[in-house]
Image: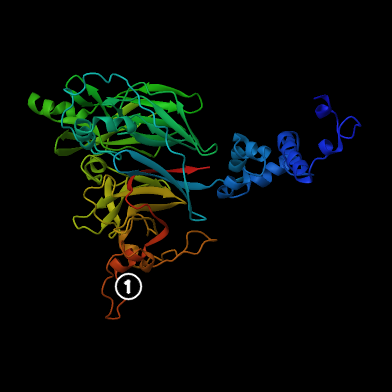
Amino acid sequence: MGSFLSLPGTNAQPSSQTEISSAESSKRLRMSSCYNDENQRLISNLPDEISLQILARLPRIWYLNVKMVSRSWKAAITSPEIYRLRNELGTTEEWLYILTKIGEDKLLWHALDPFSRKWQKLPPMPNIVYKEESKRVFSALRAWNVLGSTIKIADYIRSWLVRKDELDRLPFCGCTIGAVDGCLYVLGGFSRASAMRCVWKYDPCLNMWQEVMSMTTGRAYCKTGMLNGKLYVVGGVSRGRGGLAPLQSAEVYDPRTGLWTEVPSMPFSKAQVLPTAFLAEMLKPIATGMTSYRGRLYVPQSLYSWPFFVDVGGEIYDPETNTWAEMPAGMGEGWPARQAGTKLSVVVDGELYALDPSSTLDSGKIKIYDHQADAWKVVVEKVPIRDFTDAESPYLLAGFLGKLHVITKGTDNDIAILQAELPNHMCPQSMSSSPLASSLNENSSLPSSSSSLPSSLSLPPANSSNGKAMSLEEAEIDAWKVIASKNFEVAELVSCQVLNI
C-alpha cells in the first residue's frame, strides 16, 4: 500500500504504477485551476476593477453563458456589485416578464429581452402547499367570483368541490404579482381554501426563487403597486366567518429591511353612504386595480354582488401624509375596465394609459388620463386584440423602452408583444398628421406597418383605393408593430411585469 502512496519518480514504485496519462493530467490541471480560480484575476493581466467594468457592459442575455466560464466569473455575474455598476454606467436593461398558466395547476414564467428578442424560461415556482386554517372550510365557501389578474375564484371553488386533491398541486391559486428593487414577487393566494400570507421573490441576478417575510394579512386577488422603492399591497379577499370577504386593509414591503408594515385601510367612502342596510349587506366594496401615478397610489374600486359590479370611483393614497383621499370623479368613473372587477393601467413617461375593450370582437381603444381636465381621452381608436371570453387575461399592458405595449394572444396561440407609436398625447386629432416612428431603437430594425402583425391579430385596413390620403383609422393601425412573439400553445396569459436591471 505504501508504494501506491509514494511520490511519482521514487524507486519504490513500479513504473507501471507511476505513469499517468496525459489526458488524466490535463483533467487534474483543469480541476485544480477551477478550484483555485477564486484567487486569480477575472481577466489575466487586468485588475478586477477593470474586468468588472467590462462584464458590466455586456448584454444581460450573455450572462447565462458567461457564468459558465469559471466560478470566479459566476460569482462576479451574480454579485450585487456588478448590477450596481451597471446602474452607474447606464447599461441597465428592461426585460419583460410574462406569467402564463397551463390548465388549472401549472404556472410558468417567461422573460423577453426586447433588444435581442430572445426568450428565457424562468425556474418554476416552488410547489409548496401551506396548511393555514384548512379545516372545516367546505361549508364556508360561497359562490363568489372576483375576477382578478390571475385565477378566477369561482373556478377555484368548483375545482375544490369536484377535485379536492388537485388543490394540493396549486398553492398559488389567486396569487398576485408585483415588482420592486429589480425582483419579482408572488404574493398570497389560496391553499386548500385558506388565504395565504406567504411571499416568494425571484431574483434575476441569481435566477432563483426564495421565500421572504410573509404579509401581515392573508389575502388573495390583492392589488400591488411600487412607489418610492417599496411594494404596496391593498385589498383582496380572505376567508371570513360567512365565506370569502373583501379586505380593506393595506400594507407595504421595504426590500431594504425585508419587513412589512401596515398602512391605513382604504376607507371605501362610497360604500359607507349606501341608502339602506340591505344594500350595504348585499354590495361588497372591492379594489379593482392599483397604479403608481404622480407620486401617489391610485386604487379604482367597485361595489360587488355576483354577477354585478358597480363602479364607484376610487381612492388615492398619499405616502407623505399616510392618508387616503377620494379619487377625482372623472378619473374614477371613466377608468376603463378590462373585465368586470378588473381595471388595468400602465404609466409610460409619466402618463397614465388604459385599454378600453370595444363591444366588437377584434379591437379596443387606448385612452390616456388628462389630470388637468379630469377626463379620459382616446389616443388610439384601434388596438388589434382578439376576444377570448373564457380567458382570464385576454390582454396585458406594459410600459418599457419608453413606449406603451400590449401583450395579446392570437387565434394561432402566438403571444405577440405589440408596441405603440402614440401621437401627441392630448391631441388625438393630430394622429393623421403626426409621423409614426419606424424602429424600436437606433440599433434595431423592425417592421413598421400593419403587415407586420400576425394574421390572427391584423385588423382589416380602411378602404384607400380612391387615392385619398391615409385615413385616421389606417394611421392608427400603422401605429402598432410586433417587436416579439412566441407560440405558447395552450398557455393563457396571467400577468406581466417589467424589471430594469
In the image, residue 194 sits, relative to residue 112, either above or below, namely above
Q: Residue furthest right?
A: 11
Nearest the eye: 160 or 418: 160
Q: Position of residue 67 (x, y in %)?
A: 62, 42
The amino acid type of the residue labelled 1 equals Met
Q: Position of residue 35 (x, y in %)?
A: 71, 34
Nearest the eye: 310 or 328: 310
In the image, residue 53 sits, relative to residue 315, either above or below, namely below
In the image, residue 366 sits, relative to residue 263, either above or below, namely below
What residue lies at 39% left-to-right and 33% top-to-bottom? 186
Say left or right for 9 vs 317. right
Q: Position of residue 10 (x, y in %)?
A: 90, 32
Query: Residue 14 falls in which quadrant of the image?
Result: top right
Q: Which quadrant is the N terminus positioned in?
A: top right
Give the number of marks: 1
Can see residue 321?
no
Query: Residue 251 falls in which quadrant of the image?
Result: top left
Residue of label 1: 470
What residue lies at 33% left-to-right and 53% top-to-bottom? 408
What's the coloring here? Answer: rainbow
What residue lies at 83% left-to-right and 24% top-to-bottom? 2
Can see residue 431?
yes
Say left or right for 124 vs 5. left
In the image, residue 144 sits, relative to residue 432, either above or below, namely above
